[in-house]
Amino acid sequence: MKKALAEALDRRGYASLTAVQQQVTDPDLIGADLIVSAQTGSGKTLGFGLAVAPTLLGDDETFPPAALPLALILAPTRELAMQVKRELSWLYAEAGAVIASCVGGMDMRDERRSLQRGAHIVVATPGRLRDHLTRGSIDLGDLRAVVLDEADEMLDLGFREDLEFILGEAPEERQTLMFSATVPRSITALARRYQRDAIRISTTAETSQHADIEYQAMSVPARDVENAIINVLRFHEAPNALVFVNTRAMVNRLTTRLSNRGFPVVALSGELSQAERTHALQAMRDGRARVCVATDVAARGIDLPNLDLVVHAELPLNQETLLHRSGRTGRAGRKGVSVLIVPPSARRKAERILGAAKLRADWGSAPSADAVRARDEERMLSDPLWEAEITETEREAIGTLLERFGPEQIAARFLRLHAGMHSAPEELSSFDTKPKARTEFGPSVWFSVSGGHSQRAEPRRLIPMLCKAGGLSSRDIGAIRVANRESFVEIRQSSVESFLAAIGPEMLVEDGATLSRVDGPPAETRSPRPRPGPRSRDRMPAR
């Protein structure tokens, strides 16, 4: 390894390399074309930075004056491209590398001037780089290495034509590295066409996928979804949390709700400008915001160093999206938590996606308000400030407080101040998280209710009417069959006595509808609705 790069790693505190970094820096692979399967968070950015260094520097320790680019790094999104640029900037700082970027959303004139001044490494998104090539703003004639980062995502986002154009403009004698979470047939075809005898590297992260991420699936009533999200965020109090939704409208709705509840929150969606997205991510990095609500496309490639919690407020479309979302946390040896908020109607979908991704989640309910308060108390009592020595300045103020208020009042005031620093948790509805097995209705009695199709009788109207009049719950009502002039209702036998007592001897329920007991279910209930006959002339409406 080059001395300048080794010193940069030491300053950053890298005592050892990750699995992917060790494999791509094998001395036997210097200059070789590689296809590397590596999950997000495995350290692949630093890996390909180290892998291409011998090709770029040769026998030298530092770069010559910048001219035409020697290396090209392609990434699917602006955020990932800028992240790669930041990583390579400190890695190659002592080697004197000049690194330029060409990404959508930035001023193209500034990028053109930067390229004219010269750059050793260019980090770009495919669409913007192709624009520069067609306008003659960049010359790839001196390229020694090309890296395709997140190659599968670039193909998924429709960049195949741009990639083929760019690789066709690069010199044939070059080192080409492809990094991809998966290696589908499309990646293999691209490798055969643009790489020479590429060596396949599969890291251990591919076989033990997301081993540092704890998956939790929380069954939540549909009406409590947003309240559950608030309680999850409060329960974990993560330095950085990412909340995924599926639409821009939901981003705006949830961002507003969290902001009103006192969360320092930012939004990421496709309607934001590049400057707004950059400011949002910077607010997360420097601690001004702790929660980011984002869509999948807006969050592709972002890297937040202290992201400990990912919340799927709305379920992803498939297992690939689930893995990509969750992969934002649990990176480079850090532990992370991925929480799926699952209303009853989405339980089967959640189980199907988890199964397809070969992941096991702990099913349960969302944290209750009491659970959040208990966690707050636990964090408060474990604060290391309790062990700190009392300073002389503090002793004088402590003495004054004790003289005026006493220990209990001071403790109560402290608790109120501590509680005021956080948003209050939400009270959630009681909810059985276990899927209910279908059981037989059991012994029952049938009743006839006057009024059928001709009176627009429907089960959704009959059920609340009977429950209100007879003191029943919906579980006490079984089958409902609506005929033309009357309706038939099955009521659980154990509830019949109290039902009749509530109805009264007149057997009237609502709007004059009468109730009568019948021997059993009717043989045929759905008779055809009568067709209205022709109107007589005297009933014809006037024009």
Image (spheres, rainbow, N blue to C red):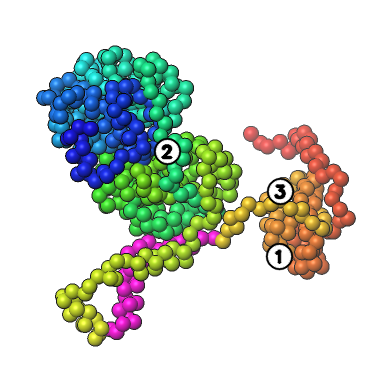
Local secondary structure at mark 3: loop
Q: Where does the image place residue 326, in percent across and percent down from the top left? A: 43, 43
Q: Earlier in the sequence, mark 1 or mark 3?
A: 3
Question: Which amino acid type corresponds to the residue marked 2 in the rendered image?
Answer: Ala
Secondary element at image label 1 = loop
The residue labelled by disc 1 is: 471
Q: Quadrant of residue 57?
A: top left
Label disc, if present, on residue 458 of the rendered structure:
3
Q: CA distance from mark 2 to mark 1?
A: 59 Å
SS class, disc 2: helix
Q: Which residues are magenta?
A: 405-429
* The N terminus: image quadrant: top left
Question: How many neighbours does mark 1 have within 10 angstroms: few (below 14), some (14-19), or many (20 or more)?
Answer: some
Q: Nearer the viewer, mark 1 or mark 3?
A: 1
Observer-side mark, 3 or 2, equals: 2
Mark number displayed over residue 205:
2
- Residue at (86% x, 45% y) in the render: 523
For disc 2, the neighbor class at 10 Å (few under 14, some 14 to 19, many from 20) is some
Q: Is residue 89 visible?
A: no
Which percent across, then down, holds residue 441? 77, 55
Queried whether the magenta region covers residue 439, the answer comes back as no
| Residue type (three-letter) at the residue carrying disc 1 | Gly
Alpha carbons under labels 3 and 2: distance apart:
56 Å
